[in-house]
Amino acid sequence: MESTLVRRDQFNITPQGIVHKPTDAAFTPYPGDPFSGIERSGQLANQHPNGSGFRAEDVRRMMRELWAEYVTSNPQLFNL
């Protein structure tokens, strides 16, 4: 399977969580703890008909990194 590049601009980040737009994979934090929550796989397990797709571990790694950056840059949103 050919791996599709995961890019920062593929993510939508709000105080309510982060979503990888192409796959709908997401992380939604629990109230009061921005680093614990629910992870949704979305379409990560589905392979595109042409054989290409996103590697789940790449999407999850980028999601964790971007979410940590967002929380650190916006502590007032999370009562840190």
Image (cartoon, rainbow, N blue to C red):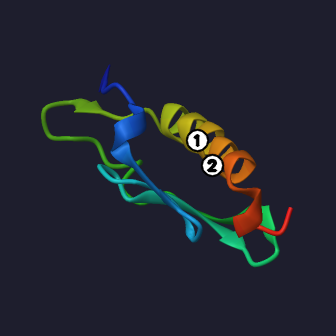
**Which residue is farthest right?**
80
Quadrant placement of the C terminus: bottom right
Horizontal relation, residue 37 to residue 11: left or right: right
**1 lies left or right of 78:** left
Task: Name the foreground residue: 40 vs 19.
Answer: 19
* Residue at image point 83% right, 69% down: 79
Which numbered tag is attached to residue 70?
A: 2
Residue pushed farthest front?
A: 76
Compared with 44, 55 (above or below) is above
The amino acid beneath tag 2 is Tyr
Q: CA distance from mark 1 to mark 2?
A: 6 Å
**Left or right: residue 4 compared with residue 35:** left
SS class of the residue under badge 2? helix
Question: Residue 64, image x and y in percent?
Answer: 64, 43
Label 1 close to label 2 by CB (< 8 Å): yes
Question: Which residue was labeled with disc 1?
Answer: 66
